[in-house]
Image: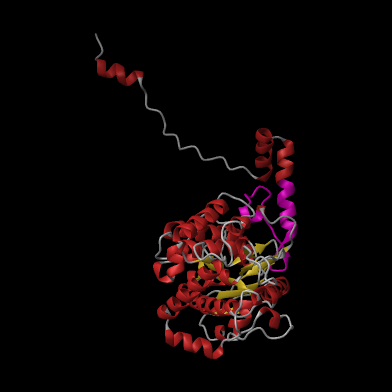
Amino acid sequence: MERSATSEAKQAAPELPAVAPAKPIVLGPAAAILTLQRTAGNRAVGAVIDGQRRLARRINVGQAPLKRGLLQKMTPRELALGDADVSFSDHDEYERWRNGDERIAYWSEAKLMARLDPGVTYVLGENHASSTGTASDLVKALGTRRYRHEGMTEAPTSGRATQVLGGLAQGRGRSVLHDEAATGGNAGEDFLPKVLRGLAMTAPTNPVDRSAKKYVRVLDEITLRLVSWALLNAPQEVGAHFWEHRAAFHKLGLEIADRQLGGEKDVRSSLAGNVEWSPVDDTAPSFLKFRTEFTRWATAEIERTRNQEAYRAFESDYAPIGRDQANGEGSTGDYDHPATPESLFLKGATGDLMAAEKQRDFSMLQHIRQAAAVGDLVYGLGRLHLTRLRKLLADVPNVRAMTIDEFKDECRAKEKRAAASGKPVAE
């Protein structure tokens, strides 16, 4: 008797018991090390473990050495710590640091842990050339884009060469902060006051011999860049002499800009070899006439566009201190001092230079107010600017103004408290 196909199929394929899904294999420390040895080799394993142990020895958390797994992945901040010894008040503060919190970072140039209180914009007066920690170094250590710096200048909003000058302004910011992605929101001051300061730092190559018809002398490459901004951006209102020779001045400004953007280290000969300070022949471009006309126009433009009420309040508490006065060598803070081309180099900061510095300081004060309003963490400026603005900054909400050395001392005090108490150091 034949069996049905259905019954044969049932006998050929008996049901199997259900199998539970396989559980992932979790390796303990010893097994994990063994696996790493097999894949990377004994030497690589030894290096990883040694790095973890050295890191644990250098970090204290709540008065105790750091406890961490031998194969726990190190973050970029931990890898960059080097041989520094640091302390954290508790494990939460340590985790915030290692995971990139913008308010706490190891500042390698200053050799300390920088801690910024919440809700505060730190205005730090510095020596821009210091090798022991500047505001720019601090910004890079924090990994933040919430900063402003006087080295970054607002690009002009009008003029023949706005696009060229805008690129130059951003280039200046990158040279200060080494940040290719820096934007205009990081600028620390306005365009015209900065350019006036650059023009004021020019003089004849031989300021003593007044009979000599010499070429233009500039102090440094940054000053020359500011001069090129003026040459490129001067409008028709600057005056008859500029407008008569505008082609020659524009050509010179573009040459300076092109050579500097091309990476040349010393472009000062570009100015000295093309435009005389005050040539005898009026048909030739005179840099003295250009500087006089541009300064007159730019000063009037600044006065026309500024908030007059804010400026009157600024003048009431402003401290007009010049460089020599700050160094104990007598006062150079008199803005009514007669300005001559010779005095700018023979007597230091007088006349046009101090007038330009005053306009820069007012501009910086407005940018600091803006920085505090949007919650920027750091504003960097020169120590002398801070000295002149300090009384005014005391009344700006959410701003703490100090020299960068005072800020370092504060950070060291916080580090000691973290090491000694094991309690939070910033509320």
Placement of 156 over or under 18, stated as above or below:
below
Placement of 289 over or under 303, stated as above or below:
above
The answer to which of 366 and 112 lies nearer the viewer is: 366
Placement of 403 over or under 333, stated as above or below:
above
- Magenta stretch holds residue 73: yes
x, y percentage for residue 420? 73, 73
Instruction: Report the residue at 62% width, 49% height from top.
Output: 73
The answer to which of 299 and 243 lies nearer the viewer is: 243
**Residue range corresponding to the magenta coloring:** 49-78
In which quadrant will I find the N terminus?
A: top left
The answer to which of 400 and 237 lies nearer the viewer is: 237
**Left or right of residue 149: residue 342:** right
Toward the front, the furthest residue is 281
Instruction: Report the residue at 66% width, 83% height from top.
Output: 332
- Magenta stretch holds residue 87: no
Q: On the image, which quarter does residue 427 sit in?
A: bottom right
The answer to which of 395 and 23 lies nearer the viewer is: 395
Q: How many labels does the image show?
A: 0
Q: On the image, which quarter does residue 97 sit in?
A: bottom right
Viewer can see residue 95 = no
x, y percentage for residue 335? 58, 85
x, y percentage for residue 218? 63, 64
x, y percentage for residue 197? 56, 72
Viewer can see residue 356 = yes
**Left or right of residue 397: residue 135:** right
